[in-house]
Amino acid sequence: MRRCRLVTNLSEQIEQWQKAQDAALQLVRKTGNELTALRSKALEPFETQVKALLQQVGMPNAVLKVKLEPLSAPAPHGMDAIQFLFDANKSGRFEPLEKVASGGELSRLMLSIKSLVAGGLNMPTLIFDEIDSGISGEAARQVGVIMQSLAQKHQLIAITHQPQIAARAATHYFVYKQEKNKAIKTGVRVLSTDERVQAIAQMLSGNEHAEASAKIAREMLGVV
């Protein structure tokens, strides 16, 4: 009799757990479908904004498309498989971003996306490690403009070799290496205004003492 009662209780518990699991799964699917609807609604505005920013940073023909594919079962990121497709040159062929984008294209694309999402996320500090890789000239200047705009609401730390970007910083740190006690040590220090002029002049021409480069550096920094 006692054993029969234990079996009955266990069966009831299993049934309760199964009902709880089914209810939880139903809630997960409902939430996942709501997330899919929000993503679908946001796709076109997001793609349009990214395209506009890519034009600003010197990629007038580049287009990013986001493809959502439904999953058969819930996943940690929702009910969709998300794929980023890219066409840099109006070819009409959209391929997976990771297969077709160059280093410079990826750098500018990541900056464009981060500049869009940063305002909606709790990210007080943004770090860009050579996000200007593979670009120069006007494209680098426009990247600097976007980064300076981002810096109005976020602390921005950028590792760069581009004078167009370095000149827009509020504070310029110089990273260097030196031998100390028979070991190579890495250090960092804040540059003064005159040192910034020298550093940016060197970025421009490779010669920090060239008067022409120094003059351009002073103009970029707004230093008389």
Image (tube, grey):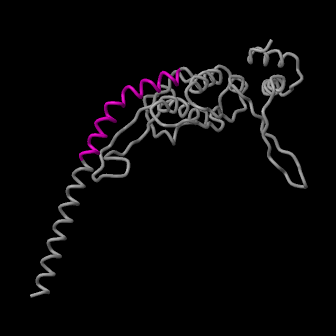
Camera-side residue: 84 or 212? 212
Q: Where's residue 213, x and y in %?
A: 83, 19
Taking the spot 55% from the left edge, 35% from the top edge, the residue there is 124
What residue do we see at 52% from left, 29% from top? 115
Residue 196 versus residue 15 in the image, above or below: above
Residue 194 in the magenta stretch? The answer is no
* 39 to the left or right of 191: left
Point out the image quarter for the N terminus: bottom left
Q: Residue at x 63, y 24 (%)?
A: 144
The answer to which quarter of the image holds residue 152 is: top right
Which is the main secondary structure of the residues drawn in magenta?
A: helix
Q: Is residue 221 left or right of residue 19?
A: right
How far from the left and from the top, in percent, is residue 3? Answer: 14, 86
Viewer-proximal residue, 160 or 94?
160
Q: Which residues are magenta?
A: 30-55
In this rendering, would 1 be left or right of 96? left
Residue at the extreme front: 2
For the C terminus, give its image quadrant. Answer: top right
